Amino acid sequence: MIRKDTKLQLEGMRCAACARRVEKTVKQLEGVISISVNFATEKAVVTYNPHKISLSAICEAIEKIEYKVTDNNRFDEYKARKQKEINTLFTKFTVSACFAVPLLYIAMAPMINIVSLPFPAILVPMHHPLVYALLQLVLVVPIIGVGYKFYTAGFRYMIQRSPNMDSLIATGTGAAFIYSVYNTIQIANGHKDAVESLYFETAGVIITLILLGKLMEAISKGRTGEAIKKLMGITPKTAIVLQNDTEKEIPIDEIKIGDIIVVKPGVRIPVDGTVTDGYTAIDESMLTGESTPVDKKAGDVVYAASLNTVGVIWFKAEKIGNDTAVAHIIKLVEDAQNSKASIVKLTDTVSGYFVPIVCVIAFLSGIAWFFGTGGDLKFALTIFISVLVIACPCALGLATPTAIMVATGKGAENGIFIKSGEALETVHKIDTVVFDKTGTITEGKPVVTDIIGGFDVLKYAASVEKLSEHPLASAIVNEADELYPVTDFYSVTGMGVQANVNGKTVKVGHAGFVGVEQQYGESFAEHGKTPLFVSVDGHYKGLIAVADVVKPSSSAAIETLHKMGIEVVMITGDSEKTAAAIAKQVGINKVFAEVLPQDKSSEIKKLQETGRKVAMVGDGINDAPALTQADIGIAIGSGTDVAIESADIVLMHSDLMDVPMAIHLSKQTVRNIRQNLFWAFGYNILGIPIAAGALFLFGGPLINPMFAAAAMSLSSVSVIINALRLKNINLK
């Protein structure tokens, strides 16, 4: 089956029920394979068969149910849209509050007997009931006006049999308003007792409180996306391109592959490419985490968003737009924030069915109390409104995606890129971590560790190895400061190299090739080092030990994992002796040595069959199957593209201490999600029975609809504030 994935930015979603409505509508389209809508990020990830349905048809179906599909890939557009939303909500809340405060005072002041509040005689309810009622009506109308979307959207969705949060608010406050207008007419007709059945302030204050909750929600949701905004914001908007030997500044979107770009000191690299001329040092800390600038010359690769520090360089553009390294990082973060873990899907399902169930509960509660009180409409209406208002499922819909957004952003800030919400949820269950050796525990490139026989031995050996293509040769050459002229070079495959150096025959290689006893190098081999022997004119002069050295952070990371109660395993294709030496050095007790690349995934599977939850950490193409087989695949950022694509988590700093950091982040996130769900469910589970009059049956108080609205708003705010605490956890 042909599959295509696309990401859509949505506008107009007002609660978790809206997200479910979009999912339900799009899933019914022929050719759509799957859709996942994230209410917190307002994005939909759609998988479809392009031969059966077009993207425009999907967008049209979404817009038919009153949601807008927009393009907000650019940082400035995204920021402008979110700020406009916040500004609009702030204006609406301000207007609403300006009318709600005097409305509440006028409605409540005559009822407060504890203190004597100043109150105009013309407004005393029992003396001038019609003036009292009409003034409240005048004050509540502007509030309903600024909150008109609750009614237009809420009643429309009810007619379409897809009630959402707006439906609850519209029904509750609408009933209060209409009942109050009816009683105002009754007052005008001479029924003064109807003044006690006015609910104008209930409708006005509920809308005001909900607008406040919406405003705080919008501000908080904007903050959770800061990681992506920072990444998007560091890429320059323009670049200087060399055209016909003339420098021309153009927007970054107009750069084409093959363009020669000039970058001066203090300017960030606009796109990925290869240096053609010039020399400089570039700060790549945003990609690698290393604070020391990296020297760049002709032939070296440069990356978008990295900072040119000293010199001027010219480079050829090779990766532009969404193909750059920084764009790929942004995609990883966005994908993680848009994906849904199983716990998110569960809460989305609950939220989707929650609204119609609440409507039924509210209606039945109101009817039951109406007949139970002998026809007391005022009492029944209070119950009806309170149940509708307190049960809004916003907090439930925000509980999990908000925590995942903050956590993935926190990880991204620390160079830990988690590709999915499911991965973030799974990591905390890991009880076994399997490390590849070369390039993961070790640096991945050999260096000289020991020289026996003095620096003359090094110069002789390096002079000969200069002409060798063996992987260990470069380590010896890089160690030497001076080389001798060489003639008559030849190589014996698998044994060593030989050449004439300053008229002397120099051999470098295995003990047998040089003509010395093997035991001379045994102590080095036991420590995971490769000894290369050197002879001059047939006389043994010394040896040079070369090894792939352990990364500075490896031992500390493994020790930390052990303290967390996690078993650590090393897997490698190296000999048992070399593997054992490295394992001993870093504190690993269990080793799988001499494992062929195709067998690494089999070893992971064997561990899983014993009931272990396994994370595989690797960097090479040969690690890709094992990374995929593991419950969680973790790739080293300096590794191959294949390994990175196969993994669930990418460690951009290539620092193994990030492995326990990722596990710690996952544990804190899952804990935070559970806290959020507790608060979200807690408000509804406790609030609905209280609003329905459960306490009143046993002589307790009856909840006022205004307090119900305040509780509903506080539930959403408390969930978001709790999720934002993840920004402050110390991953170090």
Image (spheres, rainbow, N blue to C red):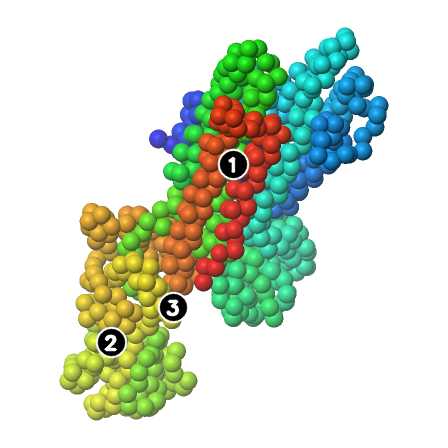
Nearer-N-terminus badge (1/2): 1
Residue 240 makes an appearance in the image: yes
**Residue situated in front as seen by the camera: 51 or 679:** 679
The nearer-to-camera label among 1 and 2 is 1
Which image quadrant is residue 258 in?
bottom right
In the figure, 181 relative to 110: above or below? above
User: What residue is at 38 percent from the left and 68 percent from the top?
Assistant: 553
| Three-letter code for the amino acid on which mark 1 is drawn | Ala
Q: CA distance from mark 3 to mark 2?
A: 19 Å
Answer with left or right where residue 347 lies relative to residue 467. Answer: right
- Residue type for callout 2: His
- Mark 1 residue crowding within 10 angstroms, few (<14) / some (14–19) / many (20+): many
Q: Nearer the N terminus, badge 3 or badge 1?
A: 1
Q: Residue 147 occupies which quadrant of the picture?
A: top right
Q: Position of residue 25 (x, y in %)?
A: 48, 23
Q: Which residue is the site of mark 1?
A: 395
Q: Which residue is mark 3?
A: 553
Mark on residue 452? Answer: none
Give the residue number, with chain letter if any, for mark 2.
527
Which numbered disc, 3 or 2, marks the residue closer to the eye? 3
Q: Is residue 351 above or below residue 541?
A: above
How many C-alpha atoms fall within 10 Å of the one at disc 3: few (<14), some, or many (≥20)?
Answer: some
Gap between marks 1 and 2 measured at Cα: 57 Å
Task: Identify which residue is drawn at 51% across, 31% down.
Answer: 687
Mark 3 vs 2, N-terminal side: 2
Q: Residues within 10 Å of mark 2 (few under 14, many from 20)?
A: some
Between marks 3 and 1, how big is the CA–CA gap?
41 Å
Question: Closer to the camera: disc 3 or disc 1?
Answer: 1
Element marked by disc 1: helix
Q: Is residue 559 left or right of residue 382?
A: left
